[in-house]
Image (cartoon, rainbow, N blue to C red):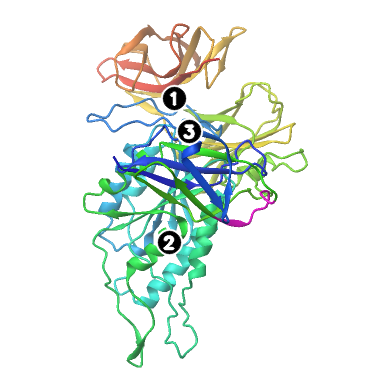
């Protein structure tokens, strides 16, 4: 069996000082299946031509859901978090939208759908379009939202793109890509970049040799900048392009003589894959087959910690070479790496409160901040004036972390802030704040700082809608515990023997009989593990609260679906769900 090793991420300084260099790579069979028994003795690493000694080699694997013949509706993500775990990957879907013609998007859509189907629930996906580096969807575990956006993607390539036009477009795409990768350089771990393009120009003068370079000159250095940025960002590139790509643009001349450069749209793709150490994948009419191996290859990777040497702490780009002694092995690697992350990384934990990013600074950006691990979720309830009330709930992953500031914002699909909230007392437990907004989809972003000078921000995507049940309107289902006789919301459970589930009902309930039940299951549509009734009480005019208890002391750790069933006589039963996460204390 042929084994393929691809060294795709080279800087992973998470939780270590910049002077301890780390090199990341993956080891797979020829079909992309990860190999998990590689030893340090089998790997030889050279940086700038010098052999480097491997101190330790560890395997990092993520939980991956294999594609099923009959997909199972797994529990939704219970909350958003910036905590670093091995449960998920970071993946960027980058689309060179001006390189695809209208009507040729279907293979791209099918490929993204196939990739999403192979990801686990903890895998985060970001969607960005080029050539302007516009983030359409920030990192999210809401894969349905990603698929929804991709289903509406439309190519923007002009019908009569000339060779010069392609060169100008390629230059803009390269500049935007390098800038975007600069933001990923502050991330806590490796990121896979799936770059879709319909064609890119290679280096060209865009003028005959006897004249000055043309306005669309494209140099090799512009490609190299992307390679250096990819090395610094620990970005694993997959360049996906149409399998039937041929040179269809005009070959331009001046005064009828003198070629200005190649118009082959594959040439730039080859350059991009070369400088990033990426893999080229064909985008065929079958769609999904092009990216099926990406999910397999990125399910596990190795981190080699090297013996430090003088100069490892600077952030210059270096040349790397990786080989393996195992027979019949092919080694692939990114040609440029950076051993130390930038000292000014905004996501890095600060050394003092004076140098930490403020909660407001973290709130108004899509950048990841992981210095202070947080959990955040949102719940929709009955509002006023046609609006809904959204309650933001946040908590530090470490209950003992003394928070100094907490802020939250609701951001609509266009990136506009719909509402904001600041905690008057950041030491309260739990931290919650209410905001009134129009019904719709939003991203909740919660940012916080603590006394140690750390900063963190977590995102959570949700649909702020009430659920109709006959003449009633139902709120979100919220989980919590009983504390001193009061309901206290909670996002994650451990030793608690009982969890409480609560939802609000608005509207007249006199007349038809009302049936209220509560179920616990492993999946959205799976059989109930337990059944109980919801007790209802009036909390206002045509406003009620239903509460039920879930015995969870004997449950093993994992994610469960809590289903509130509301049945109005003469109407189909309606359910509202929430994911309950139980962890090992």
Image marks 1 and 2: residues in contact by CB distance under 8 Å = no
> Nearer the N terminus, badge 1 or badge 3?
3
Residue drawn at x 32%, y 12% is 528
Q: Nearer the N terminus, badge 3 or badge 2?
A: 3
Q: Where is residue 341 in the image (x, y as percent from the top left)?
A: 63, 48
The residue singled out by tag 3 in the image is 59
Q: Do the residues labelled 3 and 2 touch (CB within 8 Å)?
A: no
Please identify, in this view, whether the residue under mark 3 or under mark 2 is nearer the observer: 3
Residue 293 lies in what quarter of the image?
top left
- Judging depth in this view, the residue of 45 and 61 nearest the camera is 45
Please give the name of the residue rendered at 48% of the width and 70% of the height, measured from the top-left corner.
Answer: 220
Instruction: Give coordinates of residue 470: x percent, y percent.
Output: 32, 23
* Quarter the N terminus occupies: top left
Which secondary structure lies at badge 1? loop
Q: For the residues marked 3 and 2, what is the alpha-carbon distance in whole angstroms? A: 28 Å
- For the residues bearing labels 1 and 3, Cβ distance under 8 angstroms: no
Q: How crowded is mark 3: few (under 14 residues within 10 Å), some or many (20 or more)?
A: some
Residue to which mark 2 is pinned? 272
Q: Which of marks 1 and 3 is in front?
A: 3
Q: Which numbered dot is residue 451?
A: none
């Amino acid at each position: 069996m042929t084994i393929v090793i691809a060294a795709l991420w080279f800087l992973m300084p998470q939780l270590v000082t910049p002077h301890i260099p780390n090199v990341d790579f993956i080891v797979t069979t020829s079909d992309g299946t990860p190999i998990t028994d590689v030893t340090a003795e089998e790997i030889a690493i050279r940086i700038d031509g010098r052999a480097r000694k491997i101190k330790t080699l560890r395997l990092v694997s993520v939980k991956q859901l294999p594609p099923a013949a009959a997909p199972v509706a797994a529990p939704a993500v219970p909350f958003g978090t910036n905590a670093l775990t091995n449960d998920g990957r970071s993946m960027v879907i980058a689309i060179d939208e001006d390189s695809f013609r209208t009507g040729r998007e279907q293979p791209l859509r099918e490929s993204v759908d196939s990739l999403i189907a192979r990801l686990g629930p903890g895998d985060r996906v970001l969607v960005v379009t080029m050539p302007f580096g516009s983030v359409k969807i920030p990192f999210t575990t809401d894969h349905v939202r990603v698929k929804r956006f991709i289903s509406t993607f439309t190519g923007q390539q002009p019908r009569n793109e000339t060779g010069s036009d392609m060169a100008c477009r390629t230059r803009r795409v390269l500049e935007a890509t390098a800038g975007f990768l600069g933001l990923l350089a502050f991330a806590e771990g490796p990121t896979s970049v799936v770059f879709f393009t319909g064609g890119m120009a290679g280096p060209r003068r865009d003028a005959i040799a006897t004249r000055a370079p043309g306005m669309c000159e494209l140099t090799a250095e512009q490609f190299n900048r992307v390679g250096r940025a990819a090395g610094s960002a620990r970005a694993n590139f997959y360049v996906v392009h149409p399998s039937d790509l041929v040179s269809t643009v005009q070959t331009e001349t001046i005064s009828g003589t003198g070629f200005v450069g190649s118009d082959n749209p594959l040439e730039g793709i080859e350059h991009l894959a070369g400088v990033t150490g990426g893999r080229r994948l064909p985008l065929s009419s079958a769609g999904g087959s092009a990216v099926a191996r990406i999910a397999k290859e990125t399910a596990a990777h190795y981190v080699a910690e090297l013996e430090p040497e003088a100069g490892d702490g600077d952030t210059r780009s270096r040349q790397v070479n990786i080989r393996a002694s195992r027979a019949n092995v092919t080694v692939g690697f990114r040609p440029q790496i950076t051993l130390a992350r930038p000292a000014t990384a905004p996501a890095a934990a600060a050394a003092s409160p004076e140098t930490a990013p403020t909660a407001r600074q973290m709130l108004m950006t899509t950048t990841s901040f992981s210095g202070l691990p947080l959990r955040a979720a949102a719940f929709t309830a009955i509002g006023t004036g046609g609006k809904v009330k959204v309650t933001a709930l946040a908590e530090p992953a470490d209950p003992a972390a003394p928070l100094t500031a907490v802020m939250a914002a609701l951001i609509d699909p266009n990136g506009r802030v719909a509402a904001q909230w600041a905690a008057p007392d950041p030491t309260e437990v739990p931290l919650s704040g209410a905001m009134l907004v129009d019904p719709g989809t939003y991203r909740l972003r919660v940012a916080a700082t603590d006394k140690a000078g750390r900063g963190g921000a977590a995102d959570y995507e949700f649909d702020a809608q009430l659920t109709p049940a006959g003449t009633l309107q139902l709120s979100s289902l919220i989980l919590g515990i009983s504390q001193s006789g009061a309901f206290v919301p909670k996002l994650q459970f451990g030793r608690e023997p009982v969890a409480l589930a609560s939802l609000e009902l608005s509207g007249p309930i006199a007349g038809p009989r009302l049936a209220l039940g509560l179920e616990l299951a492993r999946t959205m549509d799976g059989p109930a593990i337990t059944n109980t009734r919801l007790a209802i009480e009036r909390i206002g005019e045509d406003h009620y609260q239903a509460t039920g208890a879930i015995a969870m002391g004997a449950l093993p750790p994992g994610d469960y679906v809590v289903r509130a069933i509301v049945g109005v006589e003469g109407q189909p039963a309606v359910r509202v769900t929430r994911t309950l996460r139980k962890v090992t204390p």
